[in-house]
Image: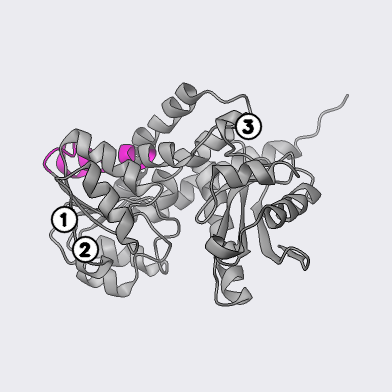
């Protein structure tokens, strides 16, 4: 854990590196008005672990890390602050590569990259991969198709009622895929402007007042696409969807929620499995970005999701436990190769 402070620019940030077993840690930078440093620390610990598992399950040669900047991005974000943050990233010497997350955007990564060699998710004009939310949404959509095949026998969402909570960077792209396939879509967002924007583009989309109303709606699929902790005891007790598959990180408020959902007959697609399209995109940037190549790899989330769901079924466990096991297995097996000594 690296605590970053720069009095001149007002920067207060925490960088967490959970694992470098598979390679340099890779994970986004979240800019959020945490109520306390303790709350920010709790978030970065959970997010960095999630990134390690996500990168492992996605087949990337990267460990897991995450950073949080404490503050309101609408009022506290400045060029000077982002550049100060970039210098802290640079000081880690390549052990951590950063990218966009909640509250940070491609333009911000361009600024951070002026101070570090280890920023991804930059604009195409700056030699980067552009908006990673595009392939994040595409990967979630592929995971949702896989869940549909597993649950209903057909990899199609046509006619299925899908509730999307959060139609910001990722959620709005997910709606595009769902609309193109002919799904019935219900959305909600704390930002009414985001909902209005989606409904202008897709008049057939319905909207409800808040997430509490959405989870009580008859749905085939519920897609949490905002902040973490979306699946808590209260939500698990009232949720009326058959499948949960969304883009938000760390959706399970605690580990027991996976068992609660399974007992209720709800098929949960582990978030770090289905939302890995974005990290696949920014990781590709490190090797000379090709959108087609990254999209093809993100498309493999379909088969990866089926593998996890089938493994869980065969082993009589939850998809969350099956995904964790497969990620830990890869970190242990491939990570150990770095300790093989050869005589020169």
In the rendered image, residue 180, in percent from the top left (x then y), is placed at: 21, 34
106 left or right of 244?
Answer: right
Q: Are marks 2 and 1 in contact (CB under 8 Å)?
A: yes
In the rendered image, residue 110, in percent from the top left (x then y), is placed at: 64, 41
* Residue 201 belongs to magenta span: no
Q: What's the residue at 36%, 54% (across, down)? A: 225
Q: Start and end of the magenta stretch?
A: 139-159
The label on residue 126 is 3
Label 1 and label 3: CA atoms lie apart by: 42 Å
Q: Residue furthest right?
A: 344
Could you classify mark 1 by the number of other residues whose Cα lies within 10 Å: few (under 14), some (14-19), or many (20 or more)? Answer: many
Helix, strand or loop for disc 2? helix
Of tags 3 and 2, the one toward the viewer is 3
Q: The N terminus is located in which quarter?
A: bottom right
Which residue matches tag 2? 214
Of tags 2 and 1, the one toward the viewer is 2
* Residue 144 belongs to magenta span: yes
Which residue matches tag 1? 219
In the rendered image, residue 280, in percent from the top left (x then y), is placed at: 51, 36
228 left or right of 1?
Answer: left
């Amino acid at each position: 854990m690296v605590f970053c402070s720069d009095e001149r620019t007002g920067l207060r940030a925490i960088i967490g590196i959970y694992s470098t077993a598979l390679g340099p840690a890779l994970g986004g930078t979240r800019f959020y008005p945490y109520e306390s440093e303790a709350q920010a620390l709790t978030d970065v610990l959970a997010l960095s672990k999630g990134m390690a598992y996500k990168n492992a399950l996605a087949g990337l040669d990267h460990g897991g890390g995450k950073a949080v900047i404490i503050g309101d991005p609408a009022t506290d974000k400045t060029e000077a602050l982002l550049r100060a943050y970039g210098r802290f990233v640079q000081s880690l010497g390549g052990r951590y590569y950063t990218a966009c997350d909640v509250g940070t955007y491609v333009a911000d990564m361009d600024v951070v990259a002026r101070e570090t060699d280890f920023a991804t998710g930059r604009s195409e004009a700056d030699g980067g991969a552009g908006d990673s939310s595009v392939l994040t949404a595409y990967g979630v959509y592929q995971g949702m198709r896989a869940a549909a095949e597993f649950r209903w026998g057909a990899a199609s969402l046509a006619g299925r009622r899908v509730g999307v909570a959060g139609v910001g960077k990722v959620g709005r792209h997910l709606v595009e895929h769902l609309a193109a396939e002919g799904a019935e879509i219900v959305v909600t967002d704390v930002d009414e402007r985001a909902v209005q924007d989606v409904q202008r583009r897709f008049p057939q989309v319905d909207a409800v007042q808040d997430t509490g109303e959405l989870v009580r709606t008859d749905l085939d699929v519920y897609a949490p696409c905002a902040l973490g902790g979306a699946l808590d005891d209260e939500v698990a007790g009232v949720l009326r969807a058959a499948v949960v598959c969304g883009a938000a990180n760390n959706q399970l408020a605690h580990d027991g929620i996976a068992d609660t959902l399974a007992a209720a007959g709800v098929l949960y697609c582990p978030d770090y499995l289905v939302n890995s399209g974005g990290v696949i995109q920014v990781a590709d940037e490190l090797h000379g970005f090709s959108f087609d190549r990254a999209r093809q790899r993100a498309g493999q989330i379909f088969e990866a999701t089926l593998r996890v769901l089938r493994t869980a079924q065969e082993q009589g466990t939850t998809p969350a436990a099956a995904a964790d096991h497969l990620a830990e297995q890869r970190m242990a097996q491939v990570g150990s190769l770095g300790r093989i000594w050869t005589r020169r």
